[in-house]
């Protein structure tokens, strides 16, 4: 069974995640707050997400398969349970809110396109991604 | 001769290939051209990686220049010399290829690329997938005809403002038509990111030459380029605003922050370190 990622685990990786993100986005490290929206708050574009994942893999010596955030967010739900015709289902939305617990509730707009999920992402989302990848690496190796 | 696989193609032959893992290749710089800028050496390494990546995914996608965390310029290359290319593929799938690589001349490394990432785009949008597959087979089996490349006159930045020796901003008018657009790419012409970087480096070198940090007439050269990020395609005819800003030098080296924008939107950013010609970082 997967145990929830703890705040201590997030806090442990946040400084290096913030440094890596600041490098990727060309901003000051002070701008990288745990809950700032990467797209709306820091003007990140799709190439920046690719860049951040690329750099995080190196900084933490982990592998982050592409699409991993949405896969993690889906939890135990099947793809069909999580989304229908590109829109997040009600049960999917509940799961997404639970996974992205750091994101204020008013930012989850219904109906939500799966393609718009990255608009919710924050540095803390990436901290969770790193922690999960570290756990996976430990379990696998 | 058709421009396709000639006007902006820098792999003559693939001499060794471990699919999806690594490859070696060659490119003979035609002796009749005037010069072969360092950015085209980087392009040659990137193109070898692109061939390996495209072949691995069955020519469904082609990578485009996007991220290069570090490029080290170790020596120049002259017309008539042969580049021996090598790439190591870190990962490759339908989404992106991550790789590093190098080029050498007569056994001496002239350029190194580390931690590069190219997102895959649908290949049919840019080129004929069957033609690419056939070309790859030719490169692996004996190689292409030499001396296809007829040289390039890279467009330059027209300086408009700034502070001599510190910073400069200007306009880069991307040509409306040029032979390289027929090769890069036949179905969707895109101004090569390496030519944009070449223009940005040239602007930084101009500013550096005005700086009192180095004695007058010191020959300066780019030694290292980091954090290259290309955000969007530049079509023929686009006008770019290009800027180079020098940071306080450290020792013999100064880092320039480079940017290119179009209509207020960032197209590409990078940093380049410039040092005297005999300096190696």
Image (cartoon, rainbow, N blue to C red):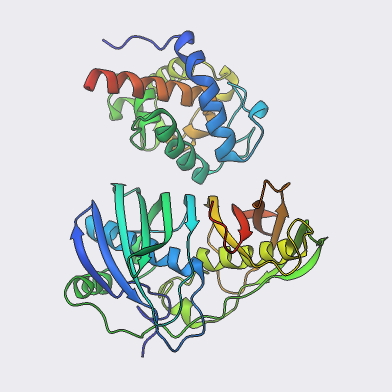
Taking the spot 62% from the left edge, 63% from the top edge, the residue there is B201
Q: Residue visible at 26% across and 63% down?
A: B24
- Left or right of B251: which side holds B103? left
Q: Is residue B240 visible?
A: no
Across and down, in percent, residue A134 comes to 35, 21
> From the viewer's perspective, is residue A79 above or below residue B217?
above
Look at 24% across and 71% down and name the residue there: B130
Q: Quadrant of residue A98?
A: top left
User: Residue A122, image x and y in percent?
Assistant: 54, 26
- x%, y% of residue B49? 33, 59
Residue in the image at 52% along x and 29% along y = A121
Q: Is residue B195 visible?
A: yes
Image quarter (top left, top right, bottom left or bottom right) of the N terminus of chain B: bottom left
Vertical position of residue A111 compared to residue B136: above or below: above
Q: Position of residue B56 (x, y in %)?
A: 23, 56
Q: How many marks?
A: 0
Given residues B6 and A113, the one toward you in this image is B6
Q: Nearer the viewer, residue B222 or B203?
A: B222
Residue B52 or residue B16, whichever sits in front: B16
Image check: B84 left or right of A103? left
């Amino acid at each position: 069974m997967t145990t929830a990622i703890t705040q201590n685990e997030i806090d442990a990786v946040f400084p290096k995640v913030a440094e890596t993100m600041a490098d990727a986005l060309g901003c000051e490290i002070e701008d990288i707050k745990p809950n700032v929206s990467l797209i709306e708050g820091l003007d990140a574009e799709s190439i920046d997400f690719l860049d951040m994942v690329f750099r995080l893999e190196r900084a933490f010596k982990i592998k982050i398969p592409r699409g991993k955030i949405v896969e993690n967010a889906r939890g135990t739900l099947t793809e069909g349970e999580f989304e229908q015709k590109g829109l997040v289902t009600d049960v999917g939305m509940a799961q997404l809110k639970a996974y992205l617990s750091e994101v204020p509730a008013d930012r989850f707009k219904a109906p939500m396109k799966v393609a718009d999920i990255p608009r919710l992402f924050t540095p803390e989302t990436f901290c969770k991604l790193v922690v999960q990848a570290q756990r996976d690496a430990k379990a696998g190796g | 001769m058709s421009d396709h696989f000639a006007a902006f193609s820098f792999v003559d032959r693939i001499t060794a290939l471990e699919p999806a893992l690594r490859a070696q290749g060659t490119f003979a710089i035609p002796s009749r051209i005037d010069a072969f800028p360092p950015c085209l050496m980087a392009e040659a390494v990137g193109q070898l990686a692109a061939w390996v990546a495209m072949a691995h995914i069955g020519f469904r996608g082609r990578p485009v220049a996007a991220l290069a965390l570090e490029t080290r310029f170790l020596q120049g290359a002259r017309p008539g010399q042969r580049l021996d290319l090598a790439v190591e593929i870190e990962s490759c799938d339908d989404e992106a290829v991550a790789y590093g690589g190098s080029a050498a001349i007569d056994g001496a490394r002239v350029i190194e690329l580390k931690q590069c990432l190219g997102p895959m785009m649908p290949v049919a949008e840019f080129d004929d997938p069957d033609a690419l597959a056939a070309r790859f087979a030719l490169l692996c089996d004996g190689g292409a005809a030499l001396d296809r490349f007829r040289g390039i006159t890279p467009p330059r930045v027209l300086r408009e403002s700034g502070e001599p020796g510190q910073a400069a901003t200007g306009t880069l008018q991307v040509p409306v038509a040029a032979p390289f657009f027929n090769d890069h790419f036949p179905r969707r012409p895109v101004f090569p990111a390496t030519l944009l970087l070449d223009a940005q480096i040239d602007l930084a070198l101009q500013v550096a030459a005005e700086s009192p940090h180095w004695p007058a007439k010191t020959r300066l050269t780019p030694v290292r380029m980091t954090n290259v990020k290309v955000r969007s395609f530049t079509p023929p005819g686009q006008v770019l605003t290009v800027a180079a800003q020098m940071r306080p030098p450290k020792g013999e080296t100064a880092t320039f922050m480079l940017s290119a924008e179009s209509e207020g939107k960032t197209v590409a950013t990078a940093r380049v370190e410039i040092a005297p010609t005999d300096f190696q970082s």
